[in-house]
Image: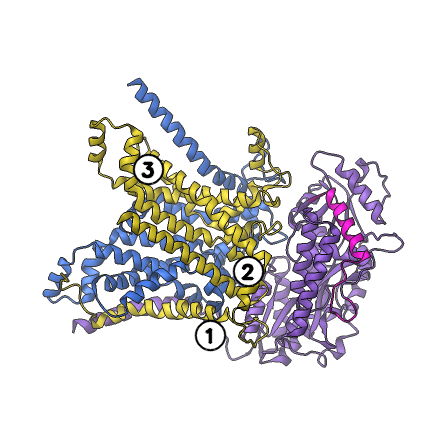
Chain colours: A blue, B yellow, C purple
């Protein structure tokens, strides 16, 4: 009994130490963003430490982050919704139908996953220009509206669902759209949760594509704005930290609110994949 | 037997597939083909005209010291992070799978770093790694040697510093995947083993490890594909320096293609990278098939 | 029936998504006026309002024109411009760094402004980088040179008296060494690490001061493995040995904290230092030279306005440029940017009245400044130069070997360029 309790304590201690390793950099980020002074070497003098929102105030006085923040939210939300819908449709067809070219489509799914960003980035740039959508929201949205990973995930998940319900619904005269809407989507909720989280995160944090596919300051997303702020002569580390904190807030909120769902979702998704 | 549901395409299916097919062709297949095409030309963005040069770009690349250095660094990065990330992830998963209060809380905390934007993480660590920064103080405390000028400014430590950050960041994500695999192992197996008097190590070897294998290999493939494409860390933290010691393949492509606008040359480098990733993934996938068959 | 209804439903959803995306992307519409797009780099809140104010004034006096501002940053501006110009679209008027003009001019992406600028040549300074193969492609918009910032307090601690000003290379190096020996995280000199596009601007002034010339007379080779090259690189290494090797931004942070004796920097550092509490005195002086008889050379950066050769309204574009460099606007702009060296000689006169001693140093240095050597392949040459210096800085190569390597690699690039 006592040894068990002792062992339990030990385990909790280890867990706490690891948790500290994972969280301390973020504590540092937060303290730095709220610090009145910041040493040259990047350390925080706890003796003279005062909490202040001054860094955030200066940052927002610069007004360089309002638009990137709005852009990031808009793009991530639209891309996520688009993926939930379109990936389900594609995954459904790929799981349930036999047709010529299906093998090719499946290969392209893997292909797109494997292609390094920079193989496509230059032609992708030329393409957005040719379509006249360079430096618009469409350039940030359209290429990512139907992700191969999403299709793959949804197909795998739907494959594992017995088709009986769909068949009987079809016998009763239900259309394909009704079948998807009423039967497939409700059954796919766990996979959709994974997809939503994955897509939102990937696009929220996406750097290279928005970096290349936009040019004006008003089109920048948050990560791009952050990376470019770093190069400014007139921005100091605490301000940069404050900006970083702002970009971490939505992810954190999402995480705190849906932490269980997110982790469960990823676990479920991985099992199916 | 294919039931009624495994059937030929319906009319509506074309609509279902069209968003994917259209974006696929416009934004992915065309660029892939275009980049393959460009890699055999001497196209420079500002020159306008171009001509075919055959395999010149590829031949030149193999003699380019910066490129071979970049390949080397990319392999070092992948080989140097993947085993650590994987091991830490397995250990953490097993740890969390055991008896522990507040399990979901700890699980979330360990996972948290991989949810945060890479740009932000890179900014934090740039500061932590600086001259006189916290990591140096930590090294001083435990008596470990460290470069005075800051970890990112020494050719000996810059790449290792980026790698360490990457391991720290990615472990939680893979831990979650391993945890899933662990939880799918039926408990009866362990109970039976315990009844047979098998030791913990033996249980791990005979039950846990074989069950983890498919996930393990899946993660190895996923992780290596990601590692070969490392870019953001380099862009934010070191810009490939000092002395090319953190120059990676994707960063090289970026520099050649989008900084110096040697598009043909950059495209050729990108395609070599693509080939390497394809070969490595293929080998790894083959391994999965053999092991799970 | 069901089929059609479903397709309709599907189409509806697609349209909603599409429309949302479209509405979001429709920030860019104009109402019948001629649109002149102007891409510029002044995004920081101290300067951008001034740019907007000037643009507003231009639109008021030219009611048929609408100027659309595009903002760039130095981190990615060069590639954005190049990509836009290569694709044949892009802006009408662009602000370019002096080192990019020949590159874009050589590839035919810029309008020849030789005739259009005839009336401007006498009133504006620093035309050299704007000229490529005898034609003028750009109009100077803003100039900035770099001077030596010295920490007086540290100099006193190191045993120098109140009046000491380093004039020769030796004086500077010795003072830097003494300051670095003060210990306690003090550094003699702020030495740039291998930051792209920055390191060469720190080395070339020493090279020029030692009498070096980058190119030979027929532009087929660089001349770094010369006496001047070796002398200047060895001197730079000597300074770095007593220095803090960091990025420019961090070096300036350290100087502002009173930790570095000498830093080479521009007007922006004056601004930064005047806006903060300081525990030390500082002064600025012109760059030292080997002999000390006259000031050493410095690197002058300039920003220039060009017209894209794809511009549909080149006249209107040139009109905007002419408006921006008028003395009145130029003075206002120089004040906003904190520049002590306005580009228009007429504004220099009105400006002179309010010159502080610091500003005078900048003006004197401007007369002893050079800009990036003009060659379309300079971006590649610059990289070779920086890599070479880096090799020497990290002691991977001796100065002689590094300089030899630079010359060899540059010659290869120049040859390749000549062949094309």
Chain of the residue on which disc 2 is drawn? B
Same subunit, labels 1 and 3: the answer reads no
Chain of the residue on which disc 3 is drawn? B
Write down the quadrant of residue C381 in the picture.
Answer: bottom right
Q: Secondary structure at mark 1?
A: helix
Residue at point 35%, 60% (across, down): A110
Q: Secondary structure at mark 3?
A: helix
Write down the quadrant of residue A19 in the picture.
Answer: top left
**Crowding near the residue tagged with mark 2, few <14, some 14–19, many ≥20 C-alpha atoms within 10 Å:** few
Which quarter of the rendering shows the N terminus of chain C?
bottom left
Outermost residue, top direction? A2
Residue at point 40%, 38% (across, down): B88
How many labels, in total?
3
Chain of the residue on which disc 1 is drawn? A
Residue A207, which numbered label? none
The boundaries of the magenta stretch are: C216-244
Which quarter of the rendering shows the C terminus of chain C?
bottom right
**Crowding near the residue tagged with mark 3, few <14, some 14–19, many ≥20 C-alpha atoms within 10 Å:** some
Residue at point 84%, 45% (across, down): C171
Q: CA distance from mark 2 to mark 1?
A: 33 Å
Residue that numbered label 1 is attached to: A130
Q: Nearer the viewer, residue A200 or C204?
A: C204
Point out residue C136 in the picture as x, y percentages from the top left corner: 72, 76
Residue that numbered label 2 is attached to: B62
Can residue B161 be found in the magenta stretch? no
Q: Nearer the viewer, residue B49 or C154?
A: B49
Residue that numbered label 3 is attached to: B104
């Amino acid at each position: 009994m006592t040894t068990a309790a002792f062992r339990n304590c030990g385990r909790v201690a280890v867990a706490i130490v690891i948790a500290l390793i994972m969280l301390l950099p973020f504590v540092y980020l937060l303290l730095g963003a709220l610090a009145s002074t910041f040493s040259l070497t990047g350390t925080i003098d706890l003796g003279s430490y005062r909490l202040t929102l001054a860094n955030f105030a200066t940052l927002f006085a610069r007004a360089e982050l309002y638009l990137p923040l709005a852009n990031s939210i808009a793009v991530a939300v639209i891309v996520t919704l688009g993926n939930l819908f379109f990936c389900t449709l594609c995954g459904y067809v790929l799981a349930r139908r036999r047709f010529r070219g299906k093998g090719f489509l499946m290969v392209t799914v893997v292909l797109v996953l494997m292609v390094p960003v920079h193989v496509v980035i230059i032609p992708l740039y030329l393409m957005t220009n040719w379509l006249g959508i360079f430096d618009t929201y469409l350039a940030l949205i359209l290429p990512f509206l139907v992700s191969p990973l999403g299709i793959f995930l949804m197909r795998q998940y739907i494959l594992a669902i017995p088709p009986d319900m769909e068949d009987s619904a079809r016998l009763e005269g239900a259309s394909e759209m009704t079948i998807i809407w009423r039967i497939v989507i409700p059954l796919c909720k766990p996979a959709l949760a994974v997809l939503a989280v994955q897509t939102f995160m990937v696009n929220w944090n996406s750097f290279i594509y928005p970096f290349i596919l936009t040019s004006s300051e008003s089109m920048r997303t948050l990560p791009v704005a952050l990376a470019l702020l770093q190069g400014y002569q007139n921005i100091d580390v605490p301000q940069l930290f404050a900006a970083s904190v702002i970009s971490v807030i939505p992810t954190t909120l999402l995480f705190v609110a849906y932490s269980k769902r997110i982790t469960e979702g990823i676990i479920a998704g991985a099992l199916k994949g | 037997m294919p039931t009624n549901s495994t059937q030929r395409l319906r009319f509506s299916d074309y609509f279902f597939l069209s968003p994917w097919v259209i974006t696929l062709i416009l934004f992915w297949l065309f660029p892939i083909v275009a980049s393959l095409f460009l890699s055999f030309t001497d196209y420079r963005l500002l020159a306008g005209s171009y001509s075919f040069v055959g395999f010149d770009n590829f031949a030149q690349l193999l003699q380019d010291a910066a490129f071979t250095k970049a390949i080397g660094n990319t392999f070092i990065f992948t080989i140097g992070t993947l085993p650590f990330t994987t091991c830490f992830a397995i250990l953490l998963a097993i740890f969390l799978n055991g008896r522990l209060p507040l399990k979901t809380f700890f699980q979330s905390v360990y996972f948290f770093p991989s949810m945060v934007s890479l740009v932000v993480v890179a900014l934090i660590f740039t500061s932590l790694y600086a001259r006189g920064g916290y990591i140096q103080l930590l090294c001083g405390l435990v008596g470990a040697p460290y470069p005075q000028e800051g970890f990112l400014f020494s050719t000996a430590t810059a790449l290792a510093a980026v790698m360490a950050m990457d391991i720290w960041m990615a472990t939680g994500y893979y831990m979650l995947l391993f945890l899933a695999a662990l939880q799918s192992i039926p408990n009866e197996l362990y109970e039976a083993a315990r009844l047979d008097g098998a030791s913990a190590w033996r249980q791990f070897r005979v039950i846990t490890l074989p069950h983890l294998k498919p996930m393990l290999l899946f993660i190895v493939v996923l992780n290596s594909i990601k590692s070969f494409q490392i870019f953001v860390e380099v862009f934010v933290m070191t810009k490939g320096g000092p002395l090319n010691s953190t120059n990676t393949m994707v960063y090289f492509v970026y520099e050649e293609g989008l900084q110096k606008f040697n598009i043909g040359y950059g495209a050729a480098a990108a395609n070599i990278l693509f080939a390497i990733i394809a070969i490595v993934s293929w080998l790894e996938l083959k391994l999965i098939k053999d092991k799970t068959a | 029936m069901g089929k059609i209804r479903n397709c309709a439903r599907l189409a509806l959803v697609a349209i909603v998504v599409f429309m949302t995306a479209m509405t979001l992307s429709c920030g860019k519409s104009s109402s019948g006026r001629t649109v002149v797009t102007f891409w510029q780099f002044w995004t920081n809140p101290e300067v951008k309002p001034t740019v907007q104010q000037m643009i507003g004034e231009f639109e008021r006096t030219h009611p048929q024109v609408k100027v659309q501002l595009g903002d760039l940053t130095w981190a990615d501006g060069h590639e954005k411009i190049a990509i836009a110009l290569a694709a044949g679209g892009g802006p009408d008027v662009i602000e370019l760094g002096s080192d990019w003009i020949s590159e874009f001019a050589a590839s035919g992406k810029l309008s020849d402004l030789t005739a259009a600028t005839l009336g401007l040549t006498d009133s504006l300074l620093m035309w050299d980088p704007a000229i490529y193969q005898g034609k003028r492609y750009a109009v100077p918009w803003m100039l900035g040179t770099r001077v030596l910032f010295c920490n007086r307090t540290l100099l006193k601690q190191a045993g120098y008296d109140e009046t000491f000003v380093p004039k020769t290379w030796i004086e500077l190096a010795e003072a830097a060494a003494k300051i670095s020996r003060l210990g306690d995280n003090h550094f003699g000199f702020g030495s740039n690490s291998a930051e792209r596009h920055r390191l060469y601007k720190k080395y070339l002034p020493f090279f020029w001061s030692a009498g070096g010339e980058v190119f030979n007379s027929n532009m087929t080779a660089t001349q770094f493995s010369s006496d001047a090259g070796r002398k200047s690189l060895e001197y730079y290494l000597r300074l770095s040995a007593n220095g803090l090797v960091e990025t420019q931004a961090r070096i300036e942070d350290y100087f502002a904290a009173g930790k570095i004796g000498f830093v080479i920097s521009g007007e922006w550092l004056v601004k930064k230092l005047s806006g903060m509490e300081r525990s030390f005195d500082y002064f600025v002086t012109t760059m030292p030279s080997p002999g000390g008889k006259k000031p050493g050379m410095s690197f002058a950066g300039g920003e220039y306005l060009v017209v894209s050769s794809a511009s549909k309204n080149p006249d209107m574009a040139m009109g905007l440029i002419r408006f921006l460099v008028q003395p009145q606007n130029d003075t206002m702009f120089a004040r906003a940017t904190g520049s002590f060296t306005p580009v228009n000689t007429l504004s220099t006169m009105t400006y002179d009245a309010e010159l502080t001693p610091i500003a005078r140093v900048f003006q004197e240095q401007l007369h002893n400044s050079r800009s990036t050597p003009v060659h379309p392949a300079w971006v590649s040459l610059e990289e070779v130069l920086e890599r070479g210096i880096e090799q020497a800085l990290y002691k991977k190569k001796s100065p002689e070997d590094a300089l030899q390597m630079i010359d060899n690699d540059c010659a290869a690039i120049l040859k390749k360029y000549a062949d094309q």
